[in-house]
Amino acid sequence: MANYNGARHLKEALDAVLGQSLAEIEVLLSDDGSTDDSLAIARDVAATDRRLKILADGVNAGPARARNRALDAARGEWVSIVDADDVILPERFACMLEAAETLGARAIADNLTFFGEPNDQPRVTLLDPEAAAIGQVTPELLILSDMNRLGMLPLGYLKPIFRRTALDGLRYGENIRIGEDFDFYMRFVLRHGPIQLLPQSYYRYRRHEHSLSHRLSEKDVADIIAAQERLLKDHPDMDTDLAALFARRKDHLNRTLNFERLVGRIKRRQMGAALGQVAGRPDLLIPLSRAMAEHLRNRHRSAGHRTARESVRIPPEQTGSPTAAVSARAPAAARAMPGRVRRTGAQALTHIRTPTYKRPEQLRRCLESLQNQTFENWICDVYDDDPQGSARAVVQAMGDPRIVHRQNATQKFASRNIDQCFSRMNPHDADYFCVVEDDNFILPRFVEDNIRICETQKVEIVFRNQLIEFESGTSNAHLSDFGILDRKLTERKFDPDRFRLSLLADIGVSNGGLFWSRDARTDLEIHFDCSATLQEYLRTYTIREPIYVAMEPLAVWAENGAGTTRDLGFDKTYLRRELNLKRSIAMLQRAAWNRVSPEDRSAFLENESFAYPVQARARGLVKSHIRLNVGPALGVREKLWLFYRGMLIRIFGRPEAGVRGFIANRGH
């Protein structure tokens, strides 16, 4: 907790942190040369609670240096930044760390609730429910929100909790006075990947006329631009698309800098210079007129009702005490947390996630199959990857309040759009989940029967057999008379290690065949860019609990060949993609083999859990370079060909970036 002359709210902020339900904490108050009663207040608190330690050297050097001093002294496994005028709910640390451990996160953030002074002022959250469902803070989202391109406040306001070892020397930039949070978070996600984001709000962010974040000077903007240049210099191999976003941000900052220069000249009454600047940049008249109108409004507003940020749109019904408002949210705070007893039977709620991109007719058929379900208590989010939002018209035409259109903030391309549908975030407080892609559909008993299996078989994940729709999207479309799991698996509950051996027969859990509960321990989201095909193999490997294979085909997978857009966004040639895919799968196969018991290895070729032929199992062992001695299942010539084929894949194929780390970190 960095503090500078925050005596007015410091006691309340310290009490909120020390009052956490998680008692094993260390509170480091890093004072930035305060001249008020801050240190006296802190010492009074420290006298009654030894968990509070005060760091002070009497020098005022800015919040970045104060925070860095505390980061250098921190000893905890996790590090949380809390401002000296803010308040956090008692369960914040416990709930967030439980979610972080479940998600395997290096950093996790929650939503913010803004409130002003006095305490009866209206309040809003940083993210509305739709934006809060994004699940992760990526570099792209940080930039777009910072430029006000997402219809929400900048994500730099967030207050993440970091695993201390992941910081690894990362510190706040002490040469920027405003925007140091953005710089710090950006450097973190560029190093470690996205920050996980919970839709719940455990953090109350106080906005008032003295809030440092509201005062932006010409020097502040110039310092932010310089900080971005240093960041780009530290990451010379940055992705081209991300570098382009940084260039857009620089243009945005330069426009802001020109505006601040104009305002500074007007305040210094340098009217000739100001008029000359406007003559060269007439576009500055628009933000100048807005600023003047805001200034006039503030002059007529009484001091007792002055709010921190008038640009926040506050619905008229959101009034009353912020304390009461946050307390009212508290029962919902654990919605994304494991362990809550889920509803059963007809009371259970199923959240269906549907990724889509410019396929209105297929999407309409998909959504109609949801409406035909015998189980009616479901809600569907349609994640539209078309920047023009073409799926919105389809959703509106359905006229079903259970179907909600969700526009992706940035285009993800199909693989990432599919992957986000497996997020552990639970914005609807649902009990069960499934993914139905826009060109697929489900049969009427799909949801009902999967819930029945979860409840009767005491499992949290079901893998459902699927029919195939051949020549999908054409007048010759027709369904197969067999399921994709026929002659491959048998109906039963599988131990996760044994189930992974299905990888050796080139089986990956298909997206449309998975159905899982809120209590599933497995994180089905892959969290890094790869093809949708590889995602399915990775999901097979990541299963960490018993999974029930249901052989009655109640879902339909559309085989549309080259017409699919699921792997758009990858620029490799077909041969390179295939070699890399096969190399990645071979690595997963060997890792799965190494994890099973010696008994399962010796019985693999004869194990009755699997229905696929012995020859298919033997081929998987040989071409993956796991075992050459497979008995009479294969002839010598075929074994040699498969062995050399596997060798060529190992020589010329390169595993997709992230696969090695995925194998090392998942399923343990």
Image (spheres, helix red, strand yellow):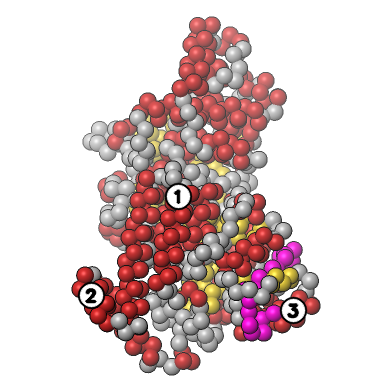
Disc 1 and disc 2 in contact, CB within 8 angstroms = no
Q: CA distance from mark 1 to mark 3?
A: 43 Å
x and y, in percent, of residue 164 in the image = 65, 55
Which secondary structure class fits the magenta region best?
A: loop
Along the line of sight, the residue nearer the viewer: 40 or 514: 40
Q: Quadrant of the N terminus?
A: bottom right
Along the line of sight, the residue nearer the viewer: 157 or 89: 157
x and y, in percent, of residue 490 in the image = 55, 30
Other residues around mark 1 within 10 Å, as few (<14) / some (14–19) / many (≥20): few
Label 2 is placed on what type of residue?
Gly
Tell me, yes or no, if residue 215 can be seen here.
yes
Say which label, 1 or 2, has the lower sequence index: 1
Residue 333, placed above or below residue 487: below
- Secondary structure, mark 2, is helix
Q: In the rendered image, which residue does mark 1 sit on?
A: 233
- Secondary structure, mark 3, is helix
* Residue at the image point whose x is 48% and y is 49% from the top: 234
